[in-house]
Amino acid sequence: MKTEKNLRAADLLARRFYQAGCRYAFGMPGGEVLTVVDALEKAGVQFILCKHENSAGFMAEGAHHMTGAPGILVATVGPGAVNGVNVVANAYQDRVPLIVLTGCVDATETLSYTHQVLDQQAVFRPITKASFMLTAEGADTIADKAIVVATDGRDGPVHIDVPISVADVQPGPVHMRRRAKTSRVVPAEAELALARSWLGSSKKPLMIAGLDALKDDASASIKRFCERQNVPVITTYKAKGILPEDHPLCLGGAGLSPRNDDILLPFVRQADLIICAGYDPIEMRVGWRDVWDADKVNVIEIATEPNIHYMHQSTLQFVSHVGLTLDAISHGISGGERWSVGDVQSKLAAAFKEPDEWGPGTVIDICREVLPRDTIATVDAGAHRILLSQKWKCFAPKELLQSSALCTMGCAVPLAMGASLIAPERTVISFSGDAGMLMVAGELSTAAELGLKTIFVVFVDASLALIDIKQRSRKMKNAGVDFAKHDFAKLADTFGGAGHTVTSVAELKTALSEAHDVDTFTVIAAVIDRGAYDGRI
């Protein structure tokens, strides 16, 4: 099939992205990407003006989690492109399919011109799955490759450098190449028979589910497998909700909280069979390295890609579709007497039960209690993320969005905005520390411009709480962790939103109720004591 003859190279890009389900692109334009923006709009991909490229990339990620289509980040030459480095690196580590379109100076021009000339492909190659330089005749092929590479195997970002003049070139009719979808893979029967024999004889099986299970949309298969085989499940933080967290076999998320690890890691070491169902350990901290000895316990690993991380090892490794493989292993096997997880669940509940009338944990509990069951939450990096990732109950996949691999600050607000844009009928709430909010406060103006009703909760303690904890634990002098308190409610008013400062449960409940009734975004500044996280995470 050939394209129309009057299409620009930028049009070929944009049309392919529209075919992939992309309906929004996010960024800040410069003169070097105006043709790209124009082409996206003409193709039906709305361009959303943000206040910083880093936030734009996280909005694109938030949108992706709601639609499944790759996100699109647009940045101009030089400083615009470099501003996006953090979020692109985050997409690489957090397995997010993000198409990164940057304007660049034409190659011939760079022979005698140096202003804003930067080897942007050299910048992005180490933090993307691929980087392409657009050519007019190859634009459609490059666009298709970008979609394929971004979504093949483990998702990730792909960069396309767009020379200024190339975007406007009309190459004439070009042959459209489309790679066929890859077939889902199930392991060979001999290996399945071995896995079934281990499962059939196991008395203490345990599943750990992660990002690859999300990629394979394996939630239904995991639930079916665990209920039939009576196998408890631990998830990584991004996989929370892949088994509803009020399910009797669910042990919730893990990987970051020392308090949680003190309970779950001894339990993991008691298992006689461990099933890694799409478990990508990039989300986990060092305490989860070599938790088990694969020479002494049977470990079945099902992943999208072979294990080259060596964070753990397995006895039997399947590079296959998570859901289909679990269905195949379970075939013909009925779970017999297995161990009970009630004691572990009780310990976890007690460990994170709030002893105080007011504090960050109480704020989280009240928000979860008051807001709808299908609320989408986002959370920034910091002490509050550790606490919230343990306490916030998810009942379906992708109901808690965060940066859990790179752990970058400033992600919660734009992630929530991207989700709100796609799913305005859902309640979306963002949880930030005050430092994280200050990094991205300008995007509140974008929330107003888009008419979003997102709720932004800010924990106000005028401190980098997690770093303060680490500093004090090393008996170091207080330095570089404290800053002034700011009136975030007034900031919301300035940008056209509704602002509340709360210091009690009653005030918080009132603020949440009013947030439901207003036609704009809401900022809830929850003032907490310095040191409020001590002993809680």
Image (cartoon, helix red, strand yellow):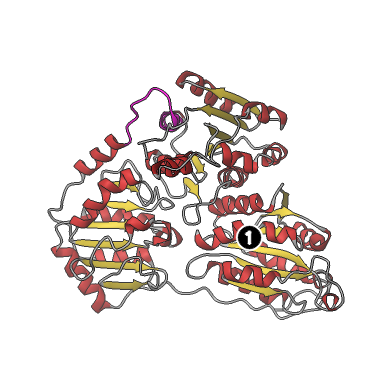
Q: Would residue 363 be counted in the magenta stretch?
A: yes
Q: Nearer the viewer, residue 11 or 98?
A: 98
- For the point 53% across and 52% down, the residue is 65
Q: Give the answer, above or below, for where 214 lies relative to 324.
A: above
Q: Give the answer, above or below, for where 454 lies relative to 150.
A: above
| Rendered location of residue 210, percent (x, y) | 39, 58
Identified by mark 1, the residue type is: Val
Residue 298 in the figure: left or right of residue 216: left
| Rendered location of residue 7, percent (x, y) | 80, 71
- For the point 27% across and 47% down, the residue is 262
- For the point 13% across and 56% down, the residue is 336
Q: Give the answer, above or below, for where 125 lies relative to 213.
A: below
Residue 151 in the figure: left or right of residue 389: right
| Rendered location of residue 286, percent (x, y) | 36, 58
What number of labels is visible?
Answer: 1
Residue 518 in the figure: left or right of residue 369: right
Per the rendered image, the range of residues in magenta is 352-369
Q: Give the answer, above or below, for where 33 lies relative to 114.
A: above
In the rendered view of the protein, which quadrant contains the C terminus? top left
Q: Name the residue that disc number 1 marks.
A: 85
Question: What secondary structure is found at the residue carrying circle 1?
Answer: helix
